[in-house]
Image: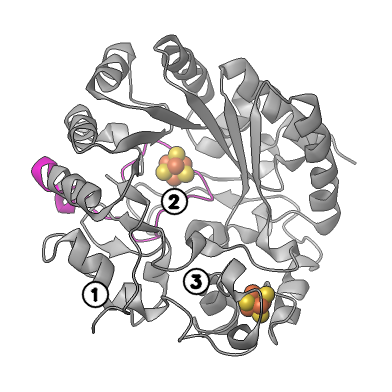
């Protein structure tokens, strides 16, 4: 298969260095079948991929996981990315990096840190993360990060258990020294789909959160930037998923498969190429997986003749597959989709998981789920005390 005539250069790359992680968040974006440590790319291959990324036109690289600190060669990897001229962003749980190692990362050229935060207090945050003491360690990590002068962003995945605590979450991020907080609703693929009954908020809570958010943005202007990713199921139109399939970004998995989005492996029949077989440039232009939904030729109605297709690119292919059975369909989040009623039905289904049992992701895969427990203990007081 050859590339369409016009393929612009990507801007960003997500490097999933490992799927290993000390935490077990129930909405983790890693796949159900995690890559094994023995299959992970070695240091030299990653550094070669970083050089190929820069040559391809990529400007920034997100070093992610799992927990990237689980890689003993993390400092070498950051140095390799920096030498290639890439802006380096570390996406971390904050567990596994001490002062000396973080200083070595800064010395190696690390530009920015994104810290995941699971809640506003130790009991609720540790319960969601599945690790006692994790929130306390995250606070210490944030202090080390800002002391080194590294810019810090706090990432929070929003769900039914913490949505009413928006104000406290923003205050916590300010206290941690973050310049930016990203509040993104859980995505319902993989682990998130397994836990959808416990994670998905109701419509009234989402509307209330929007009002709170507007107030918080005004109140914290100049102190912190608040980014918000709304939940798909309550929207009128889909988000511009990955800013267009094969348009701006790519993911490399721990074992070197190159994906147009982190959930693309959920779509059956796509052929992914690996960095062991091809250069990043060849994969970006010619890989069947990238060309499957690039541009507009693949679109069906109503997207094909819709004026918004240049804005949202027809939405998310993985969501179209999950909810309609065909990845080419219009994302059913869109009110123009003939399948939209399914999304409305999901969004307005009365919440039945009243004990809020969530299953944390496993370090090994679906065969072992470490913390099946009632979620009442995982909720922040602000949410727990809601009528
Ligand atoms: S979401 Fe949680 S479990 Fe998944 S990689 Fe991030 S910190 Fe680890
Ligand atoms: S029909 Fe397709 S292009 Fe138009 S708004 Fe809906 S998802 Fe977007």
Q: Nearer the viewer, residue 80 or 208?
A: 80
Quarter of the image with the N terminus in it: bottom left
2 vs 3, front mark: 3
Q: Give me the C-alpha separation between circle 2 and circle 3.
A: 24 Å
Q: Secondary structure at mark 3?
A: helix
Q: Which residue is mark 3?
A: 318
Quarter of the image with the C terminus in it: top right
**Which residue appears at 75% of the width and 76% of the height?**
335
* Residue 312, above or below 307: above
Residue at far top of view: 147
**Which residue appears at 68% of the width and 72% of the height?**
333
- Could you say where residue 232 lies in the image, as x and y percent from the top left? 66, 62
* Residue 31, above or below 152: below
Q: Nearer the viewer, residue 271 or 57?
A: 57
Q: Which residue is mark 1?
A: 286
Which labelled disc corresponds to residue 369? 2
Count of numbered labels shown in the rendering: 3
User: Which circle's residue, 2 or 3, is located before the other in the chain?
Assistant: 3
Assign the magenta stretch its main secondary structure: loop
Dividing the picture into quadrants, the one containing residue 102 is: top left
Residue bounds of the magenta highlight: 20-45
Do callouts 2 and 1 mark residues in contact (Cβ within 8 Å)?
Answer: no
**Mark 2: is the Cβ under 8 angstroms from ligand 1?**
no
């Amino acid at each position: 298969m050859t590339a369409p005539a016009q393929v612009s250069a990507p801007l960003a790359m997500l490097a999933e260095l490992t799927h290993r992680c000390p935490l077990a968040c129930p909405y983790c974006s890693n796949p159900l079948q995690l890559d094994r440590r023995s299959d992970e790319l070695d240091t030299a291959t990653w550094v070669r991929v970083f050089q190929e990324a820069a040559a391809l036109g990529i400007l920034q690289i997100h070093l992610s996981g799992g927990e990237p600190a689980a890689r003993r060669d993390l400092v070498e990897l950051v140095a390799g990315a920096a030498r290639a001229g890439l802006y380096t962003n570390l996406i971390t749980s904050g567990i596994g990096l001490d002062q000396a190692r973080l200083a070595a990362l800064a010395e190696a050229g690390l530009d920015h840190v994104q810290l995941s935060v699971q809640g506003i207090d130790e009991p609720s945050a540790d319960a969601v993360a599945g690790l006692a003491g994790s929130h306390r360690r995250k606070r210490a990590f944030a202090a080390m990060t800002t002391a080194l002068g590294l810019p810090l962003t706090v990432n929070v995945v929003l769900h039914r258990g913490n949505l009413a605590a928006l104000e406290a979450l923003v205050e916590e991020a300010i206290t941690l020294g973050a310049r930016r907080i990203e509040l993104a609703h859980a995505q319902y693929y993989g682990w998130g789909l397994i836990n959808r009954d416990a994670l998905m908020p109701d419509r009234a809570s989402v509307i209330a959160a929007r009002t709170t958010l507007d107030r918080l943005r005004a109140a914290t202007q100049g102190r912190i930037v608040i980014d918000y990713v709304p939940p798909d199921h309550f929207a009128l139109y889909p988000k511009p998923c990955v800013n267009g399939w094969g348009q701006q970004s790519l993911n490399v998995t721990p074992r070197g498969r190159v994906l147009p989005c982190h959930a693309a492996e959920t779509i059956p029949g796509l052929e992914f190429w690996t960095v062991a077989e091809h250069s990043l440039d060849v994969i970006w232009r010619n890989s069947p997986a990238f060309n499957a939904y690039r541009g507009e030729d693949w679109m069906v109605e109503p997207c094909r003749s819709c004026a918004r297709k240049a804005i949202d690119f027809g939405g998310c292919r993985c969501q179209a597959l999950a909810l309609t059975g065909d990845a080419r369909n219009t994302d059913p989040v869109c009110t123009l989709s003939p399948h939209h009623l399914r999304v409305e039905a999901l969004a307005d289904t009365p919440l039945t998981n009243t004990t809020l049992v969530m299953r944390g992701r496993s370090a090994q895969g679906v065969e072992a789920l470490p913390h099946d427990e009632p979620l009442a203990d995982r909720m922040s007081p602000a949410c727990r005390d809601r009528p």
